[in-house]
Amino acid sequence: MNDPHVEKLTYHVTHGDGVQYNNPPLLEWENGIFSVRAVDGEVVVTMKVHCVDEGLARSEVEPTLQAWQIYAGLEFGVGAFDLEFQHSKIIDRAPAPGQVVRVSEASVTACDGKVRIVRGFDHYPAPPTHFVMTPEVEAMYTLYALFRKGKARLSDVAYYCLTVVEREFCAEKKKCREQAARALNISTSVLTNISKLASNNRGGPKECRKWPGGTPYTNDEKRWLDTAVKALIRRVGEHAAGVPDLPQITMDLPLKP
């Protein structure tokens, strides 16, 4: 090709057993780099910027797609909506006579983010407008997703996320909990309660951070801790997006099953 240009990237929507999409309508959205068209189980990304190869185009697109998936996963649950890369459409902007458009070989590569849509949902999740994926968001969500799949303990996830927040938002290296609480507009009592519930003397033998554990969690405590972890991840992504005047996260978090 004389002047290759990636015109489109196509992804396939997949989901786990027990999830049903009831003819979701067309969903379209865009930013300054690309536009998205999601319909009939496919997500087609049309590039607005010039990319000479598939790898470069995907590196421009997939962080935003992963943020979309993570945000939806925090809202609706983990594990039932994935985007698998299928192929790209590459055109030549200065073709020689008789040259044709090249479509890459299909390759199935799951985006790193995982999301879940409510079973029987009648629409695809809307993309977040004030949330970005950072290394911290990605790391915390990856571990949280493992917990939701039964491959990690909630106490470990909560302690890990609390540690990330307190270290990343501690400029003076003292009173880090208070600094993180101010930076993210989270009540200090929320972070303190996460610390207490994720401590070594909480959780039964199968849910504790260190053997032999201690007082088992009540169902309400598990639900609160799950909700608090999601709130931390979401807030870090919102803060990174520069959202002004974020409402304070307080102890009366809405509990979701």
Image: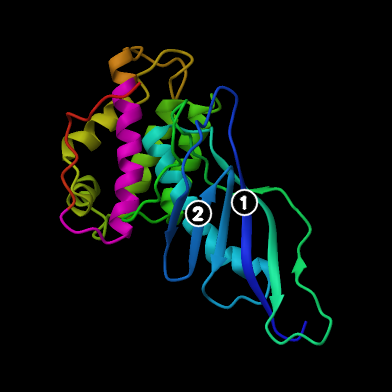
Where disc 1 sits, the SS reads: strand
Q: Nearer the viewer, mark 2 or mark 1?
A: 1
Quadrant of image for the C terminus = top left
Separation of residues labelled 2 and 1 (CA atoms): 10 Å
Q: Earlier in the sequence, mark 2 or mark 1?
A: 1
For the residue pair 15 and 136, the one nearer the viewer reads as: 15
The amino acid sitting under disc 2 is Leu
Residue 122 point in image, percent of width and height: 44, 33
Q: Where is the N terminus found, in terms of image quarters?
A: bottom right
Residue 202 location (% of width, % of height): 34, 19
Position of 239 with respect to 139 (left or right) is left
Range of the magenta residues? Answer: 223-245
Residue 3 lies left or right of residue 183; in this view the side is right
Q: Is residue 110 above or below residue 239?
A: above
- Magenta highlight on residue 240: yes
Q: Which residue is mark 2?
A: 65
Note whether 130 is above or below 117 in the view shown: below
Q: Is residue 98 above or below residue 220?
A: below
Is most of the magenta stretch helix, strand or loop?
helix
Amino acid residing under circle 1? Tyr
The structure residue drawn at horizontal position 62% and vertical position 51%, both measured from the top left corner, is: 11
Residue 247 location (% of width, % of height): 16, 46
Residue pushed farthest right? 98
Q: Is residue 166 visible?
A: no
Residue drawn at x 24%, y 58% as measured from the top left: 243
In terms of image quadrants, where is residue 210?
top left
